[in-house]
C-alpha cells in the first residue's frame, strides 16, 4: 500500500511565522502535490512537482513556496503565515504519467493548520 | 468555466436505496477519470477509476459518456457507511497539465437508517 505521511495532524502558529509542512511518500512516486481544502471551496492545488528540484505553480501559489530536494519528500513553506492561510493542507503523490493516461493520486492524512 | 462540475447535494437517502451522481467535465480531450470518496475530516481516498466501457465494483458502478462529457457513479443498496462526500476527478491530458488531476467540489451523501 502507498504510504504518504504528513509531519503533523494539527499545527497552531502565529501570524508572521515561517511555517514548514513536510510530506514523505514511500512508493518512489515521481509526482507530488500540495492542496488546501476549505469548506465550500473543495481542493485547491497550491504547488506540484514532477521530479526532484522541479516545481510548478498550481492555482493558488501566492504566499507559499515548496522544496523538493529528494524524490520522497515535498515540503510546503508558508513564508509569512497569515490568518487566511488557516486551512486543511493535503499532500498527495502519484506515479509519473505516460501513454496519455495518468495514475490516481494517494493522499496523506492532512494537516489542520491554524494561524492565530 | 470549471474543469469539473458536480452537484454538491446533499443527497439524503434511506438504507437500501439506489443513488446516482453525475459530474460534467469541460475538456473533451480528457483522458482519465476517477471517483474519490472523502469522509468527514479525513483525506480523499480513491474509490474507483472510470473506464470507457464502464466498470463495476460490488455495489458501485461508474460510467463514462464522452459524447455528453459526463461521468456517473451509481451506488446500489446503500449502506450507512456510504455516507461521505464523493469527488469526481478528471485528467484533461496534454503536456501543459503535467499529470495534475482536477477535482470537483464533491457531492455529499447521507444514508439514513
Image (tube, coloured by chain):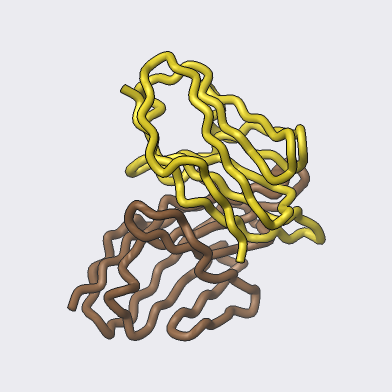
- Which residue: 55% across, 34% down? A46
Q: Quadrant of residue B108?
A: bottom left
Residue A52 in the figure: left or right of residue B33 = right
Q: Position of residue A79 (x, y in %)?
A: 53, 18
The answer to whether residue B15 is above or below residue A98 is below
Residue A83 in the figure: left or right of residue B47 = left
Q: Is residue B29 visible?
A: no
Query: Which corner quadrant holds the N terminus of chain A?
Result: bottom right
Judging from the image, what is the letter of the chain drawn in brown?
B
Residue farthest left in this picture? B113
* Total tally of numbered discs in the picture: 0
Q: Nearer the viewer, residue B31 or A92?
A: A92
Query: Which corner quadrant holds the C terminus of chain A?
Result: top left
Residue farthest front in this picture? A7
Q: Position of residue B100 (x, y in %)?
A: 65, 47
The answer to whether residue B58 is above or below residue A102 is below
The answer to whether residue B102 is above or below residue A48 is below
Residue B7 in the figure: left or right of residue A61 = left
The answer to whether residue A15 is above or below residue B50 is above
Q: Position of residue A9 (x, y in %)?
A: 41, 44
Residue farthest top in this picture? A16
Q: Nearer the viewer, residue B96 or B80?
A: B80
Q: Nearer the viewer, residue B86 or A10?
A: A10
Q: Quadrant of residue A105?
A: bottom right
- Which residue: 52% across, 34% down? A21
Shade representing chain A: yellow
- Which residue: 44% across, 17% down? A17
- Which residue: 60% across, 25% down? A65
Q: Is residue B87 visible?
A: yes
Residue A90 in the figure: left or right of residue A105 = left
Amino acid at each position: 500500500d502507498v504510504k504518504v505521511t504528513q509531519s503533523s495532524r494539527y499545527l497552531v502558529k502565529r501570524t508572521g511565522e515561517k511555517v514548514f509542512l513536510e510530506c514523505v511518500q514511500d512508493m518512489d512516486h515521481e509526482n507530488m502535490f500540495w492542496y488546501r481544502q476549505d469548506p465550500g471551496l473543495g481542493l485547491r492545488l497550491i504547488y506540484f512537482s514532477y521530479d526532484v528540484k522541479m516545481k510548478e505553480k498550481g492555482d493558488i501559489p501566492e504566499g507559499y513556496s515548496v522544496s523538493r530536494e529528494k524524490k520522497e519528500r515535498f515540503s510546503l513553506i508558508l513564508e509569512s503565515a497569515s490568518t487566511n492561510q488557516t486551512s486543511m493542507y493535503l499532500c498527495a503523490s502519484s506515479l509519473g504519467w505516460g501513454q496519455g493516461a495518468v495514475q490516481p493520486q494517494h493522499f496523506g492524512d492532512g494537516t489542520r493548520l491554524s494561524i492565530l | 468555466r470549471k474543469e469539473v462540475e458536480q452537484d454538491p447535494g446533499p443527497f439524503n437517502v434511506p438504507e437500501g436505496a439506489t443513488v446516482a451522481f453525475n459530474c460534467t467535465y469541460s475538456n473533451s480531450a480528457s483522458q482519465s477519470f476517477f471517483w474519490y470518496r472523502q469522509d468527514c475530516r479525513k483525506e480523499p481516498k480513491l474509490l474507483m477509476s472510470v473506464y470507457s466501457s464502464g466498470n463495476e465494483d460490488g455495489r458501485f458502478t461508474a460510467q463514462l459518456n464522452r459524447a455528453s462529457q459526463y461521468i456517473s457513479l451509481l451506488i446500489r443498496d446503500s449502506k450507512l457507511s456510504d455516507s461521505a462526500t464523493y469527488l469526481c476527478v478528471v485528467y484533461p491530458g496534454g503536456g501543459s497539465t503535467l499529470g495534475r488531476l482536477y477535482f470537483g467540489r464533491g457531492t455529499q451523501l447521507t444514508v439514513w437508517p
